[in-house]
Image (cartoon, rainbow, N blue to C red):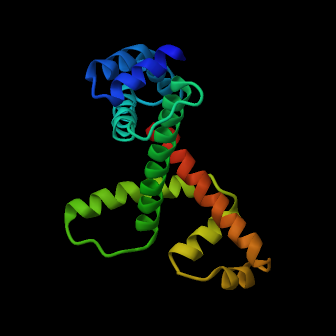
Amino acid sequence: MTDDKALIGRLKRGDQAALECIYVKYRPQLMATACSYHVDRHVAEDILHDVFLSFTKRITKFEINHSLYGYLRAGILNGIRDMIRRRSRQKTGMIRHVLSDEIMHSPHECSVQSEEVNIVEKLLHTLSEPQREVVRLRIRQGLKFKDIARVQGVSSSTVRGRYRYGISHMRGSVIRHLG
């Protein structure tokens, strides 16, 4: 830790060689951490780059209280979580788009949507019937949870849970499939 304090002190004074020392010292461990979460090596490099960029931007206010490695590792883990959230939102957007019955304009759009429809239909069939019905009624018909609850004869909170679980399950399946 004393070595890290000295490196941070040098970095605060503008010594770029100190940043290189920190990078060389912690890169292997940080890459191993990222890759242990099944992150592609190129994506792990991007996350590592972002963590070091953020670290250098905040260096003037940075105070080392614990371990520098722990701080950088937390940045890596946050970067992985952010990436997963972004991918998850993209996949949910695809699911919503496919289920929304939008009119297509070109043959290419039709073929892409056809492929997406097949994927979403397969994902829908991995859900229980009540969940599948909630997802379809909510997205295709635009029904509110309270209206779906009346149709299914259950409470609104049950419907919200079925929807949340159904979408989450489909999203997780897409993420596992696409890696």
Closest to the observer, 78 or 143: 78
Q: Is residue 169 above or below residue 9?
A: below
Locate residue 140, reporting x and y percent.
50, 76
Which residue is found at the position 37% from the left and 40% from the top?
Answer: 54
Please indicate whether residue 141 sits to the left or right of residue 114 in the image: right
Res 133 → quadrant? bottom right
**To which quarter of the image does residue 167 belong?**
bottom right
Query: Residue at position x 48%, y 57% from top?
Result: 120
Nearer the observer, 167 or 31: 31
Q: Nearer the viewer, residue 179 or 65?
A: 65
Q: What residue is shown at x 56% (from left), y 53% (from top)? A: 170
Q: Is residue 125 visible?
A: no
Instruction: Work out whether 52 lies above or below 32.
Output: below
Visible in this render: residue 115? yes
Measured along the vertical axis of the image, is residue 33 above or below residue 55? above
Q: Residue furthest right?
A: 154
Where in the figure is residue 26, as x and y percent of width and height? 44, 18
Q: Quadrant of the C terminus?
A: top left
Give the image location of residue 52, x and y in percent: 37, 32
Quadrant for the N terminus in the image: top right
Task: Give residue 51's position: percent from left, percent from top.
Answer: 40, 35
- Asked whether, in this view, residue 116 is left or right of residue 164, the answer is left
Number of residue marks: 0
